[in-house]
């Protein structure tokens, strides 16, 4: 019996999601018109999941690594506590005019601050700690981000990491020179061996790892 492909399962899940709020829809439309690689937006299923986690944790401070259009930053902002804020790190400062015009203009977008520059350089200058962190940037540096992000995560805080299945490459023999898959595998191992952390890898889209800081 054919129970449907992976893509069909994802489409079914997406079909059950509530409609995207208008501000997200508008941002997505603008990103398809004005930006390269609009498929980098987290998309409805993952976006609604990020929003759900944000509503459940009601964070005061959220950190994102890899802003792109700001789609996920908006989803993460949806459950912020009053006076809460999302700080998002983005290497590409050419996105700044897009953010000015399409992200910071919505009510929720005003709660998002983008810091431009390589995240590994920006992170040590951020003094705050966070209840929720979303890592979705340069895969080759994933393992380098870990100690910095762990330091910034509050106890019982949640670290979400995208692309941890990396289109299934994590299951195949590692190819020489594949620094992205190597870093993803290394990060998985580091977290799994870390007694302070507890992980669950969800097969959502390209693999969303959820990590709780126990102590
Ligand atoms: C997959 S996109 C992020 C998508 C976004 N999180 C969302 O779901 O809407 C990855 C982003 O990470 C950014 N990026 C890549 N390397 C980076 C670095 N070293 N520091 C900060 N951002 C980086 C890219 O420019 C790109 O905008």
Image (spheres, rainbow, N blue to C red):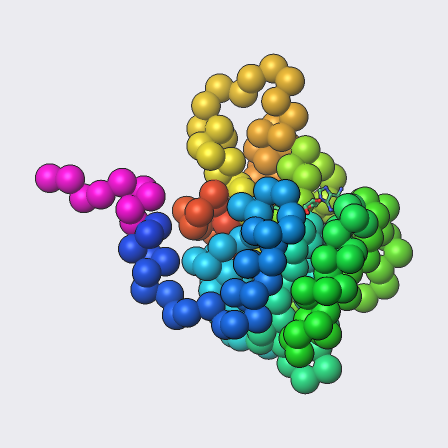
Seen in the picture, residue 10 relative to 132 is either above or below; the reply is above
Residue 208 placement (x, y as % from top left): 50, 49
The residue closer to the viewer here, 23 or 130, is: 23
In the rendered image, the residue lying farthest to the top is 176
Position of 178 compared to 7: left or right? right
| Residue 88 visible from this viewpoint | no
Task: Give the residue drawn at x 71%, y 37%.
Answer: 141
In the rendered image, the residue lying farthest to the bottom is 82
Position of 100 compared to 212: left or right? right
Magenta stretch contains residue 65: no
The residue closer to the viewer here, 16 or 200, is: 16
How many discs mark residues in the rendered view? Answer: 0
In the rendered image, which quarter is residue 64 located in?
Answer: bottom right
Task: Give the residue drawn at x 29%, y 49%.
Answer: 9
Q: Which residues are magenta?
A: 1-9
Residue 48 placement (x, y as % from top left): 47, 64
In the rendered image, which quarter is residue 1 located in?
Answer: top left
Task: Give the residue drawn at x 65%, y 59%.
Answer: 70
Residue 32 placement (x, y as % from top left): 57, 51
Residue 128 placement (x, y as % from top left): 81, 66
The residue closer to the viewer here, 185 or 30, is: 30
* The C terminus lies in quadrant: bottom right
Position of 212 compared to 148: left or right? left
| Residue 29 visible from this viewpoint | yes
In the rendered image, the residue lying farthest to the left is 1
Task: Give the residue drawn at x 76%, y 64%.
Answer: 100
The residue closer to the viewer here, 103 or 115, is: 103
In the rendered image, the residue lying farthest to the right is 125
Seen in the picture, residue 191 relative to 31 is either above or below; the reply is above
Seen in the picture, residue 178 relative to 211 is either above or below; the reply is above
């Amino acid at each position: 019996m054919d129970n449907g492909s992976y893509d069909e399962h994802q489409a079914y899940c997406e079909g059950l999601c509530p409609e995207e709020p208008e501000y997200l829809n508008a941002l997505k439309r603008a990103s398809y018109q004005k930006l390269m690689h609009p498929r980098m937006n987290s998309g409805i299923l993952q976006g609604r999941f990020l929003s759900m986690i944000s509503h459940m944790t009601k964070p005061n401070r959220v950190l994102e690594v890899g802003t792109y259009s700001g789609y996920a930053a908006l989803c993460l902002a949806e459950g912020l506590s009053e006076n809460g804020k999302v700080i998002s790190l983005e290497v590409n400062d050419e996105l700044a005019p897009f953010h000015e015009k399409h992200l910071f203009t919505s009510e929720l977008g005003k709660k998002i601050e983008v810091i431009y520059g390589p995240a590994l350089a920006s992170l040590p200058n951020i003094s705050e700690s966070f209840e929720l962190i979303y890592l979705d940037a340069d895969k080759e540096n994933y393992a380098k981000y870990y100690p910095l992000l762990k330091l910034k995560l509050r106890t019982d805080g949640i670290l979400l990491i995208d692309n941890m299945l990396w289109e299934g490459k994590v299951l195949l023999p590692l190819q020489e020179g594949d620094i992205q898959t190597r870093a993803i595998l290394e990060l998985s191992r580091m977290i799994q061996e870390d007694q302070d952390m507890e992980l669950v890898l969800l097969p959502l889209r390209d693999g969303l790892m959820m990590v709780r800081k126990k102590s």
